[in-house]
Image (spheres, rainbow, N blue to C red):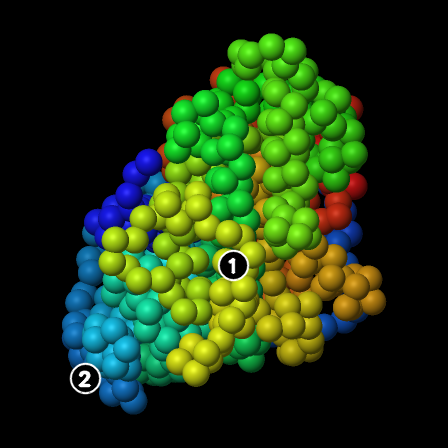
Amino acid sequence: MKTTSAASLALVATLLAACGGGGSSGFFPTPSTGTSTSSGGNTTPPASGGTTTTPPVETLPVLGVAVGAALKDCASLTGFNFANTTITAANSIAAGTLTVAGKSVGAHCQVTGSMYSRTSTVDGQNYAVGFEMRLPANWNGRFFYQANGGIDGSVVTATGAVNGGGALDNALNMGFAVISSDAGHQQGTPFFGIDPQARLDYGYQAVAKLTPMAKALIASAYGKGPDRSYFGGCSNGGRHTMVAMSRYPDDYDGFLVGDPGFRLPLAASANIVGAQNYNALATTPGDLGTGFTATERALVSNAVLAKCDALDGATDGLVQDTGACQAAFNLDRDVPTCSGSRDGTCLSADQKQRIGQLFAGALDGNGQKFYSSFPFDAGLGTSGWSTWKFQFSLLLDPGAVAFIWQVPPESPTGFSGSTFTLNSNIDTILAKITATSALYTENSLSFMTPPNPSDLSKLKKRGAKAMVYHGTSDPIFSSDDTQRWYNELMAANGGDASNFARFYRVPGMNHCAGGPTTDQFDMLTPLVNWVEKGEIADSVVASARGTGNAGGVNADVPASWAPDRTRPLCAYPKVARYKGSGDIEKAENFVCQ
C-alpha cells in the first residue's frame, strides 16, 4: 500500500489542475463545427451543423451585443492602481506566441499580479490571490472569467475554454479579455486548507475579489469596461461557475458550466466509499483495479450497449437515451454471474452487489445515500473512468477531504492518502466535512457549494443565461447529480427553466473530455448569441476526435466510427434520435425529441 507524500500530492494536484482547468489543458474545450442559430422553432440540426433553436417560454431581457475597442498601451498597465492589488508585469505578447489547434492566437497584453497578500497566523505560510489577465489588441468588448480545475493553486494560461475536449478555439482568440487565477493559494497540495481564509478564497471569495479588479483593469486598458461578462469552467471550474451563478448573478451575463463538481466534498467522499468497496473486491489488496478489471468493465459496457444502444433508433455505440437505459439495463440480470472464479466473462455476486450499489449511490454507515447515483453508460471501460475510481481516490480525494474540507483538518505529518481512504469511517468523514469551529466558521458544504442552487431568480430576471453540460460517463461527478439539480431548477420555475438555463448531456463522455463520445464542441458562441441576441440553442453540434483531428485525437473513439462523427447535444430532457435514414455519422440525420 502506497504512502502519499507531499511530493506525490503536488504531482497529482498538478495533473488534476489540468483536468477541467483552463487554457491549453486539452480537458477544456472547444468548437468543432461552428455553431449557428436562428430565431425559428426548428428542432432538426441544420445540414451545415451548428445549433438549432426553439422559442422561449417567457419573454426575458436580451442584453444587447457587446462593442469592442482597441488596446491602448500595454506597458502603461504596470501603473494600474486598485485596492489591495500589486501588478508585477505587463508584457506585450506577439501574435503566434500562443496557438490553438495550430492557429495563431492574436497579439495581446499579459498582465500578472496578486491581490490581498498576507502571511497566515494559522500555518505561517504566505498567501495571495494570484492572477494573470490577457487583453487582446482587438477586443470584442467581452470579459471571460476562466474558472480553473482541481484544487487550483497555480495561475494557468488565461485563454478561456469554449468547452468539451480538444480545443479548436478559445475565448482569448475570439477577442475576449480573459482572467485566470490560483484561487488564493500558491501550494500544489491540499495543505493550504489548514488556513481558514485560503479555504474561503478557494471556495468562493477569490471571485468576489478578482471580479471588480478585472473589470477596472479592462477599463484602464481600453478606455471602457466590458459590455458583457462571462464565467466558465469544467470540473471544479464548473463548481466555481455554479457558485458564481448563485452568489454573483449581477456581475456576469453568461455562465458556461461543465461537468460541475458542485457538491464536490460529497462526491469526493463517495469516491472514497467506492475505493473501499473496490479494495474489498480486489484480488491484490491496495490495487483497486483488480476489483473491477478492464476486461470486466468492458463486459459491463458492452452489456449496457446491448440493452441501450438502439433505444435512440441507431446502433452506433452511443447511448443517447440515458434515462430509458437505466430502466432497460439491469446489472444482475444482464451480466453473467460467475459460478466459479472470475475470468472476465462474468461478475461475482459480491461484485454485482457492491458495484451495483455504487452506481445506485454511495451509502453512509446507516445505509442512507449521501451522494447521487451514476448512470450506466458506454464509457466505463476507459482509462479516464478507471483513473478517477482507482487512482485518484487514493491520491486526490483523501487530501482534499482531510485538509480542505474537514474540521479540524488532519495533520500533514506522515499523512498517507491511501491509508486515509481505505481505513477511514465514512460517518466520521461526513461529520467532519459538515462541522464548524471557532477557527473554521464555514463548513465545506457552505463554502464549496452554491447557496440555494435552484433559486436563480436574480440571474433570470436581469437577462443572464446559463448553459450546462455533463458527460454521462463522468466517473467522479455524476451527470445524475447535475440532472437532479436541473430538475429542481425547472420545478422552481413552474416546470420549465429553458428560457434562461439549459442542460446538455454528452453521451459517453468521461470527466470533461474523453470516452467513446463526440466531445468536441463550442458552447461559448451559442451562449453569447443567447445572452446578446436572444437566440436559444436547442442543440449544439459535437464532433468525435478521431485520427487527424486538429484539436488532438481522443484514443477512446472506436475504430468503427467515422473519425469526424457528429451528433447534436440536445437540451434536456430531449434526446437525439435517428431519423431512420441517412448517414449515421452525421448530426443532420438526428433530431432532438
| Local crowd size for mark 1, using a 10 Å CA cut-off: few (<14), some (14–19), many (≥20) | few
Quarter the N terminus occupies: top left
Q: Secondary structure at mark 1?
A: helix
> At 35% from the left edge and 48% from the top edge, which residue is drawn?
417
Q: Is residue 379 left or right of residue 416?
A: right
Disc 1, disc 2: CB below 8 Å?
A: no
The answer to whether 144 appears left or right of 301 in the picture is: left
Where is residue 6 shown, x and y percent of the image?
Answer: 24, 52
Which quarter of the picture shows residue 491? bottom right
Mark 1 to mark 2: distance in Å?
Answer: 51 Å
Which residue is found at the position 78% from the left and 41% from the top?
593
Residue 428 badge:
1
Horizontal and vertical percent position of residue 404: 39, 64
For disc 2, the marked residue is 79
Which of the marked residues, 1 or 2, is nearer the chain's N terminus? Answer: 2
Question: Mark 1: which amino acid?
Answer: Thr
User: Is residue 204 or residue 225 the one in the foreground?
Assistant: 204
Q: Position of residue 280 (x, y in %)?
A: 51, 32
Residue 351's image quarter? top right
Does the rendering let one see residue 272? yes
- SS at mark 2 in the image: helix
Q: Nearer the viewer, residue 496 or 334?
A: 334
Q: At which x and y percent is residue 403?
A: 37, 62
Binning the other alpha carbons within 10 Å of mark 2 as few (below 14), some (14 to 19) or many (20 upward) gives few
